[in-house]
Image: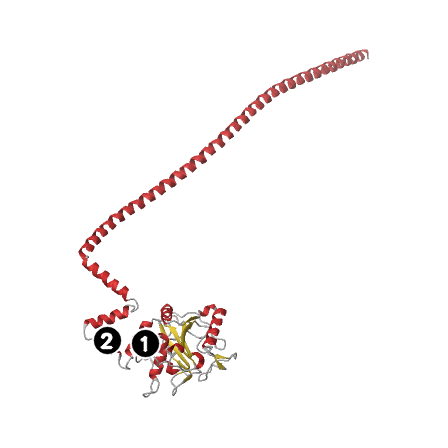
Amino acid sequence: MYELSRVRLYSIGPAGARYADTVLDLRGVGEPVPDPAPTQAEFFQEEPVGPPRRPAPAGVLFLENGGGKSVLLKLIFSVMLPGHRNTLGGASSGVLRKFLLADDCGHVALEWQHVQTGECVVVGKVSEWRGRQVSNDPRKFAEAWYSFRPGLTLDNLPVAESNAVRPPVEGQSGAQGRRRTMKGFRDALTEAGKAYPHLEVHWEEIHERWTEHLGELGLDPELFRYQREMNADEGEAAGLFAVKKDSDFTDLLLRAVTDTRDTDGLADLVSGFGNKLGRRAELIAERDFTAGSVDLLGRIVESAEARSRARDVHAGAERRTRTLARRLSARGARERVRAADLAQRVTAAAYAVTHAESARERSALITAELAYRHASLALAAAEKAATAQKRELADARTLHAAW
């Protein structure tokens, strides 16, 4: 939901009470917005401090009769409710054209602020006389509507041809230089939209499409239609609901919720409800049957889901079992190869042991023979030495005896 934050009126109004360049500022006096969106200050502005505040919740405009209250409302409503049939105060086809002089390119721009985030959107209307000549021919009265997001504001709205960059001054027009025509204004907006896509510039010249675009932005034109009806004769809002019978209130309610351009759709809707009421007993029985069927089908669906889950579990277990069997088979093959290798190694080791035993026995025999021969030689040497000693002893005894 949006609230009106500012209004800018430029080069428009009746001949005796012109709006040369007027801004009605309602900003920054309401409650803080609860969920502020991130914002960036303008080039010449200081950084914002604290959350933004909502516009004024109410305002009073004190003017005497003929001071321009109705003119202001008509200009505002010309943006939100396009078409002379929606003009405040009646369906006068020329009331808005009287607010524009031959050389004018009139602007009515409205800045709306979201009550939750504080984000702004600007919608406006621009109008001029084709050929710069006032005429009674409504086809020569050109009107167009536009909208854009922050980046452009009411302060730097390109209503005049000026390249000067200056901070806005309260009470002084921000438009400098020669006034732009409608084509120049549209070209400036289009170029800005191409250079800065986040502006979301939209231009429209057809009433119905503009009304649809307002709905897309979140600005419901239907609310303004009721505002127009409540202010049609500058009376109280209670007059709108002053109905004499139930059918009048029904008509009011149908007008509120139904698009008057689609009466065939409303007729089809009422006819459809009538047919349904005529078949109520049949529809109730069908509803009960459908409810019972839905209950049973729900159970079937639950059983099918349980069966599907069981199948998934079984398939997973079977898949894991097959994987395990393949792994065991591969492991068995590897173990058999390894056992055969170990058997060959055992046979070779047994053969090596047998060969070593034979070699050990042969070595033992050789060792014994060597020991025997060594002992025999040692014995022979000992016997020879003993014989020599005996001879020497005999010689010694002989010598001793001789002495």
The image quadrant where one finds the N terminus is: bottom left
Q: Is residue 16 left or right of residue 364?
A: left
Amino acid under disc 1: Arg
Q: Nearer the viewer, residue 271 or 23?
A: 271
- Image height check: is 356 above or below 29? above
Q: Which residue is drawn at the image coordinates 46% and 32% (left, top)?
A: 332
Q: Position of residue 198 (x, y in %)?
A: 46, 68
Q: Which residue is drawn at the image coordinates 25% and 69% (left, top)?
A: 254
Discs 1, 2 touching: Cβ within 8 Å: no
* Among numbered discs 1 and 2, the one appearing first in the sequence: 1
Q: Closer to the observer: label 1 or label 2?
A: 1
Mark 2, residue position: 241
Q: Is residue 361 left or right of residue 245?
A: right
Q: Which residue is drawn at the image coordinates 30% and 45% (left, top)?
A: 304
Q: Secondary structure at mark 1?
A: helix
Q: Nearer the viewer, residue 272 or 40?
A: 272
Q: Nearer the viewer, residue 198 or 255?
A: 255
Hey, which quadrant is residue 31 in on the image? bottom left
Mark 1, residue position: 85
Real-space Cα separation, disc 1 to disc 2, in angstroms: 21 Å
Q: Position of residue 400 (x, y in %)?
A: 79, 13
